[in-house]
Amino acid sequence: MELLTAVNPKVDIQKIQAAIAASGADAWLFYDHHHRDPLASQILSLPMDDLVSRRWYYVIPAQGEPQKLVHKIESGKLDSLPGEKRTYAAWQQLEQHLREMLAPYTRLAMQYSPRNAIMYVSMVDAGTIELLREFGKTIVSSADLVSQFQAVLTEQQIASHFVAQQAIDEILAAGFAEIGRRSAAQEHFTEYDMVLWLEDSMRRAGLVWEHRPNVSVNANSADSHYEPSAENSRPIRTGDFLLIDIWARQDPARAGFETCFYDITWTAVIGREPTEEEVRVFTTVRDARDAAIRAVEEAFAAGRPIQGWEADDRARAVITEAGYGDYFTHRTGHNISSTLHGSGAHLDNLETHDERRLLPNTCFSVEPGIYLEHFGVRSEVNMMTSATSARVTGNMQQQLLRI
């Protein structure tokens, strides 16, 4: 056994220990093999592309020195982290060392979710859970701990969100104007042409993105994950119903840190007034969005913890009462951080029953939708929280846009 000194200043062991103690767990056990748990690498600041051909374990107790267990072939795998190191070769040695290093702890937090309810953090395989239970351990979910160390934003990241917000709001407005110009000139252009136009605008603004923005007309707008391409794209014409979903962040290579995304969706009609049905559907979606926003605002103002499912319920109730419940086929919102879909709480009581708390200094989308056969409406905004408040960070669409 060997005692090593931390060489990675990005990992604040004392902060992690304080969070473990506050959660009621005795320790947080990290385990990986073949990068089955990317969250472990992210939280512990380990290389995401490093070879992990043998199992490793790292336990951080609420109090005391961390410990690690690595294979002799990959004995340096966790050398960037503090704590006593044990090595193994045979599986019998692995189990013996694991039992010994976990002996002082009963309640272990792991990337685990009972019944796989929150699959985003359910990374540990069933066999490992079985082994630990044979050791007499109680395994609890690390979901809120993961949120604390993956979703909580720094002041720099929060500021970067607003830089992206200002740029994207301006690009979207310019994009609608460009569609109006091309339509008035009776130019032939497609959804994909506008995707390229938006990407070029974002590139010139110093932004980067995951996947391409979504520009969709008519029935395509009813596909919440539609991806226009050169091959499948439809023409955009006067009279069409239009949806644009766009997201980006400051280029982290230029900023020098991991920046935060901004992600919004707006809808419009081109060259005409909206139909009664379009107005009714949009109004329902807007009111559902605002109901979820109020739920979050009220909770933070009152100092009351709020879980992701609660905000989803508030939005979903509005849409269900209006008779469109079967057409709201996704969660109300997702966490946003340096990845578009982050590791914090989602606003969800449909796809999952998300009991993770919406934490201070986190960002998330609010984006209910109704998707009928011939068109779909989604209205998406972002919210940013602090210790005492929550607010929408950009422009809010209040009625269908007329282009």
Image: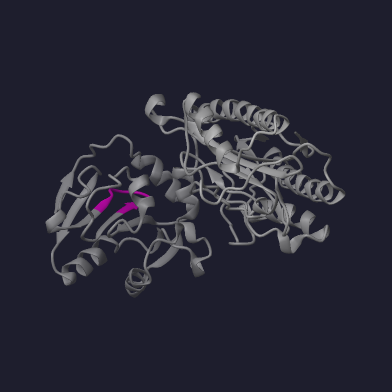
Q: Position of residue 366 (x, y in %)?
A: 65, 45
Q: Is residue 74 left or right of residue 196?
A: left
Let me know if residue 61 is in the magenta part: yes
In the rendering, at what x and y percent does residue 364 appear? 59, 43
Q: Nearer the viewer, residue 24 or 226?
A: 226
Q: Is residue 165 above or below residue 53?
A: above
Residue 183, visible in the rendered structure: yes
Report the residue at 77% width, 43% height from top.
Answer: 239
Write down the quadrant of residue 13 in the picture. Answer: top left
Residue 98 falls inside the magenta stretch: no
Q: Is residue 208 left or right of residue 99?
A: right
Residue at 24% over, 44% down: 82
Q: Is residue 95 above or below residue 381?
A: below
* Position of the C terminus by quadrant: top right
Percent position of residue 89, x then y: 13, 65
319 on left or right of 342: right
In magenta, the rendered stretch is: 59-67
Q: Would you place residue 219 above or below residue 95 in this image?
A: above
Q: Residue at x 37, y 29 (%)?
A: 253
